[in-house]
Image (cartoon, helix red, strand yellow):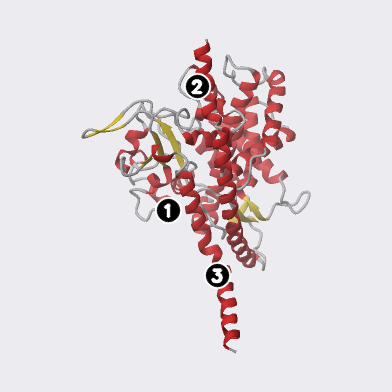
Amino acid sequence: MLSGVWATAGWVAAALVVVSLPRWLPGRVVALRGWVFTRINGDESIPVPGDLVGVDRFREVYSHPAASGRSRGAALSDLFWYWLSPGPEMHQEHLEEGERYDAVALATRRILSVPRARAEELTRRCVTRALRDGPGRDGPGRERRGVVRLRDLTMPAWAEFSYELVFGEECPPYARDLIVGNADDVVTSLKCCGLRHMDRRDRLTSYLVESLPRLRDDVRRELPPGLTDRERALYLQGAFFNTAVVQMSEATAHVLMALAQHPEIQDRARGGDDRYLDQVISETLRLYPLFGIAHRITTGEIPLGEGTAIPAGSVLCFDYPSFHRAGFPDPERFDPGRFAPGHTPVRELNHIPFGMPANRPCPAWRLAPLMMRVAVREILGAYRLDSTAAHTRSLPNRGPCLLTPLGAPRGPGHRMTLLFMRFRDDWENLWRSLVQLVLGTYMVWDARRLRLCERHFADLSGDAIRS
């Protein structure tokens, strides 16, 4: 009799543990992944802000001329090069200072130098087409509705935008699918939710290599001189068809997720006040910065005063989320009013979503907010958004959201759909956290085994010695 009671109690306890797993296990796994990640660089990593460099000196150190190394000399670089392959040696973010970087940066600025009206019109057209033609509609001619993943919803629009921005012609469906497949594979592996599929990435590289001779006269701006067609293809793939597509998709998804979970802010943002929508975007990028950790390698000593200095060759790990939360009251609360007129000027806030002018800011820092505003405005003008899914900076769930055509009544299943969304997201998060732990550990090991960055610079040194 007693043994039966104990057995029943054991089963009940086991059931309670299983039911509670989504509430506590993912956080433990994320902490473990963070521990693995911070051990990649060993003792050479210096967190900023941290014990050595506080929040008050974040901007000073970030903008110091010696905080300019991009890849060479950091074990962490092997991991980023692994995720960004093929062509990480041509990726603008990871090129060291020099003639090649100057040529690539100039080409990027020229491609991005489009009139505001044209950029807005192009964004509107691409977003409208993605909403009209993408998957998830009820049928031909029917409006899209139901649960979507916001990153997946917006990525085709930004793929088409980037293609037309570069080549000056409308993006063919085949090219759009190649760009989306490449960008999705990059961001999925970056979040350790899946392994790399190099065939998807190589197909885009091959397409660009084959297309560049045909499109050379149609490219809006001159591509970097002194590069082979393959190097130019890798440059475009890294800057415009990896980074631009991924970051614009994620940024737009973050804004829409924030609005979906704050209906009163969503209603006000739909009212047509661009200044308020800009505040929403700024607050979103504060709370959910696109960069987690940005690492830089010091090329010289950075003095800190009182006989203390950061030595040359140090790896600085700039923690954007920590910096963006410092100095704000109730920093976890989503409050666009922080950026309202009359408050502390933005330049004085701990808020650098696009980096800093003195240390290679995002080349699209002027254009990106305008494009995001138009994209969000188009979607808000067509749909009401609701979401009960988790909203985190890394957005591994790709932003589940319920779309209801604006003006359409919410059906009787609306509340049940949101409850199911929350339940599904909790259990997906549990499974995903375990997948991230396993795949992340494997990719860290594989990246250290391949040593893409280390070998690249070793080969360059060898060539210099031989010549």
In front: mark 1 or mark 3?
3
- Residue tagged 2: 101
Query: Along the polypeptide, which appears first: circle 1 or circle 3?
Result: 3
Q: Quadrant of residue 115?
A: top right
Q: Quadrant of residue 372?
A: top right
Percent x, y of residue 243? 56, 35
Q: Is residue 105 above or below residue 353?
A: above
Front residue of 293 and 460: 460
Percent x, y of residue 384? 60, 55
Q: Is residue 329 above or below residue 416?
A: above
Residue visible at 56% across and 82% down?
Answer: 6
Q: Is residue 252 above or below residue 391?
A: above
- Residue tagged 3: 17
Query: Along the polypeptide, which appears first: circle 2 or circle 1?
Result: 2
In front: mark 2 or mark 1?
2
Front residue of 277 and 97: 97
Query: Along the polypeptide, which appears first: circle 3 or circle 2?
Result: 3
Give the spatial CA distance, label 2 vs label 1.
38 Å
